[in-house]
Image: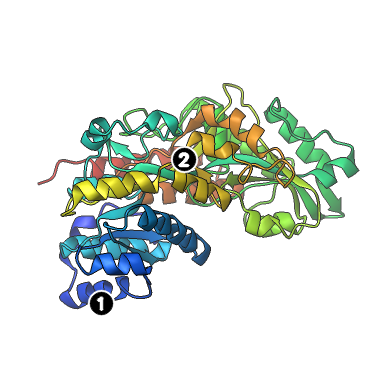
């Protein structure tokens, strides 16, 4: 099984193998490099600080520090310590700390982490706090079941991303092709991709459309499934639907754009990345909003964003959200709740939105000029989100999600490169996914 950023179903065995030396090393690293303002430092001499663990780039860590500075100004009597790390190290460090009964009070959580952590009793059910303090979840985007398990909420939404269509407006104008809009359907995408593909002999100099093929498919093939009215798993997430007729038709249509039309690159020919889009190797790219502004700001052409094309059955886009949760071992749960609700509250969301790094979870934050300024690219960001957000679906996180989503991505790579036919590939994939689900859902002995 390949390594992934997401937790697998082997949490129990991994925790049992944690050594004392590893625990002490992680605890030492987690307390380094964080400087507290004077007020917080003074308070920490008389009160135990709340520990907040996050992952992120230096820019993102800076944003969290700005948010915590605002907390310290408002609550100088409740000290807090930020414990940042990289995404790739995050889960293993958290697991070590859980095993040593030294976990932070508040943690940033991917929906992929939550089922296994809940299974181990490591997270606090937030429903009693939400009900007692009347936390306004209705003011936030619908996160579906990303942050909850069996109806229990284990994290409050902080930020997310949703699949959308980015395009090179300059290339559309040169080719005399109408730019993408909210009424576009599959065939509009396919026809535009054909017209915008530029060839020189047997070489394709510019593809009409690009999308990432490997991985969980959030910004590419999963959207074709949704738009044809089918998901990877059934509603109870106990078996696969990937070999059903609607799924086969959706993936066949997607594959034909790559292999029959030649309007999208095979992944072994050109990885569909933001850099390739900026280099004008593709006129459209399926990408996430999180805004890739640090990447696309170097583009030497006019670019914008539009909603995903509408499929035969419906409009749909895959979405994902990340939230802050409370560890079950926290010894300051009332204070931790106060900080937790502040971290995702209106003031924090305003700070977060101004960075234009991710999609704020608070609905009204996307309308803030600092986030969706129509004078700056992408100019159609706000209209695109307003059209897209009511039609989103989650990634169907389960125990074993990392394993079966890797299998999904591996199969789609093979299909998109012509190594296996759509029907045979999806039939084999369905069997593999069902095997994983049966294993991870089997009663514990």
Disc 2, SS: loop
Colouring: rainbow
Identity of the residue drawn at 22% across and 60% down: 103
Question: Residue 45, position in %: x, y?
Answer: 22, 69
- Quick check: can you spot residue 312? yes
Image quadrant in which the N terminus is located: bottom left
Residue 422 seen anywhere in this rendered image of the structure: no
Q: Name the quadrant containing residue 273.
A: bottom right
Q: Badge 2 local density, few (<14 within 10 Å), some, or many (20+)? A: many
Residue 72, given in percent of the width and then of the height, sits at 36, 58
Q: Nearer the viewer, mark 2 or mark 1?
A: 2
What separation in Å lies between label 2 and label 1 (alpha carbons)?
Answer: 34 Å
Q: Are marks 2 and 1 in contact (CB under 8 Å)?
A: no
Residue 146 x %, y %: 37, 39
Q: Is residue 139 above or below residue 206?
A: above
Q: Identify the residue at image location x=19%, y=66%.
A: 46
Does residue 259 sit above or below 280 in this rendering? above
- Using a 10 Å C-alpha cutoff, classify the residue at mark 1 as few (fewer than 14 neighbours), some (14 to 19) or many (20 or more): few
Q: Position of residue 18 (x, y in %)?
A: 19, 69
Provide the residue designation for mark 2.
361
Residue topped by disc 1: 25
Q: Is residue 231 left or right of residue 153?
A: right
């Amino acid at each position: 099984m390949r390594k992934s950023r997401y937790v697998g179903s082997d949490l129990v065995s991994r925790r049992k193998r944690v050594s004392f030396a590893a625990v002490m090393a992680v605890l030492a690293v987690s307390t380094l490099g964080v400087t507290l303002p004077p007020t917080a430092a003074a308070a920490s001499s008389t009160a135990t600080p709340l520990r907040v663990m996050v992952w992120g780039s230096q820019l993102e860590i800076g944003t969290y520090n700005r948010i915590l500075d605002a907390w310290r100004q408002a609550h100088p009597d409740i000290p807090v310590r930020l414990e940042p790390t990289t995404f790739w190290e995050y889960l293993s460090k958290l697991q070590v700390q859980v095993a040593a009964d030294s976990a932070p009070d508040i943690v940033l959580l991917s929906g992929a982490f939550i089922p296994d952590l809940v299974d181990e009793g490591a997270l606090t059910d937030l429903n009693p706090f939400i009900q007692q303090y009347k936390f306004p979840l209705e003011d936030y985007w619908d996160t579906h079941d990303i942050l909850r398990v069996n109806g229990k909420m284990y994290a409050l939404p902080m930020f997310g991303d949703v699949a959308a269509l980015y395009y090179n407006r300059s290339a559309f104008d040169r080719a005399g092709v109408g730019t993408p809009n909210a009424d576009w359907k599959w065939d509009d995408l396919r026809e535009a991709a054909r017209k915008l593909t530029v060839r020189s002999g047997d070489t394709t100099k510019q593809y009409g459309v690009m999308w990432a093929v490997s991985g969980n498919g959030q910004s590419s093939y999963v959207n074709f499934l949704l738009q044809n009215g089918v998901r990877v798993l059934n509603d109870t997430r106990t078996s696969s639907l990937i070999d059903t007729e609607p799924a086969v038709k959706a993936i066949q249509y997607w594959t034909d754009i790559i292999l029959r039309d030649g309007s999208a690159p095979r992944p072994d020919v050109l990885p569909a990345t933001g850099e390739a889009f900026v280099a004008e190797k593709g006129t459209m790219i399926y990408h996430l909003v999180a805004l890739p502004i640090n990447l696309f700001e170097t583009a030497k052409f006019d670019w914008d964003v539009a909603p995903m094309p509408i499929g035969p059955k419906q409009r749909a886009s895959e979405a994902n959200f990340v939230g802050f949760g409370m560890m079950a071992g926290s010894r300051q749960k009332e204070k931790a709740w106060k900080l937790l609700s502040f971290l995702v509250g209106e003031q924090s969301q305003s700070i977060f939105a101004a960075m234009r790094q991710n999609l704020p979870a608070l609905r009204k934050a996307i309308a803030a000029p600092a986030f969706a300024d129509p004078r700056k690219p992408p100019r159609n960001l706000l209209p695109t989100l307003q059209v897209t957000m009511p039609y989103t679906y989650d990634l169907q996180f389960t125990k074993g999600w990392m394993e079966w989503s890797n299998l999904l991505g591996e199969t789609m790579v093979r299909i998109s490169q012509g190594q296996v036919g759509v029907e045979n590939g999806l039939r084999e994939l369905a069997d593999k996914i069902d095997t994983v689900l049966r294993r991870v859902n089997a009663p514990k002995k």
